[in-house]
Amino acid sequence: MASIKEVLTRSELFKGLSDEDLEKVAALGREEVCGAGTVIFTEGSVAEDFYILNEGKVALDMSLTPTPGVGRRVTVDTMINGQSFGWSAVGGTPVYTMSARCVGPIKVVAIDGKRLQSLLQENPDMGYRVMARLAALISLRLRNMRMTLRLFHR
């Protein structure tokens, strides 16, 4: 597996950070390997970790009913190498808004959300750059999700 710092360098969220900043974030990460079908986290559960996919694919699923985990589920996005997911662990209400499921075997970097949030608060310049990228990614995911859900209402 590539080093945690290499994964961060290729990630959409941490691109452009200095080596020093990347080292600080890398110190918070751990490498994990999961098999096909593994559920990394479930919609409605407490958000503890934030993830960056190194290898493989992860499907983000959500319930289309008012109660999470009951009724029809739909895949709203698929993560590929370098993409991040589990953002709820980094800010806002620490509850996952979707479930993450391994489409095949994966390699991922998991980062403790509270520790990352503290690091970003202690380093305002890095925090601003990362959170600005995060806001752009959330906006893109929301647009993609709206298009996906429109297909289900036809």
Image (cartoon, rainbow, N blue to C red):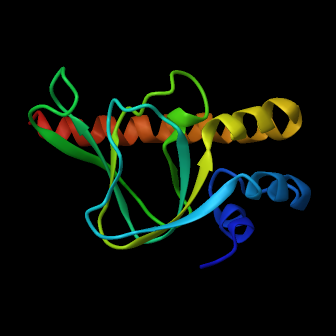
Q: Residue at x 71, y 71 (%)?
A: 6
Q: Quadrant of the N terminus?
A: bottom right
Q: Is residue 113 above or below residue 40?
A: above
Residue 135 position by quadrant: top right
Q: Is residue 121 above or below residue 83?
A: above
* Residue 2 on image: x %, y %: 64, 77
Residue sitting nearer the eye, 140 or 111: 111
* Residue 120 on image: x %, y %: 78, 36
Q: Residue furthest bottom?
A: 1
Q: Residue at x 37, y 42 (%)?
A: 144
Residue 76 position by quadrant: top left
Q: Residue furthest right?
A: 20
* Residue 121 on image: x %, y %: 80, 29
Residue sitting nearer the eye, 113 or 128: 113
Residue 5 vs residue 83: left or right? right
Residue sitting nearer the eye, 45 or 55: 45
Q: Residue at x 66, y 41 (%)?
A: 133
* Residue 131 on image: x %, y %: 69, 35
Q: Residue at x 8, y 36 (%)?
A: 154
Q: Is residue 100 above or below residue 42?
A: below
Residue 102 vs residue 20: left or right? left
Q: How many marks?
A: 0
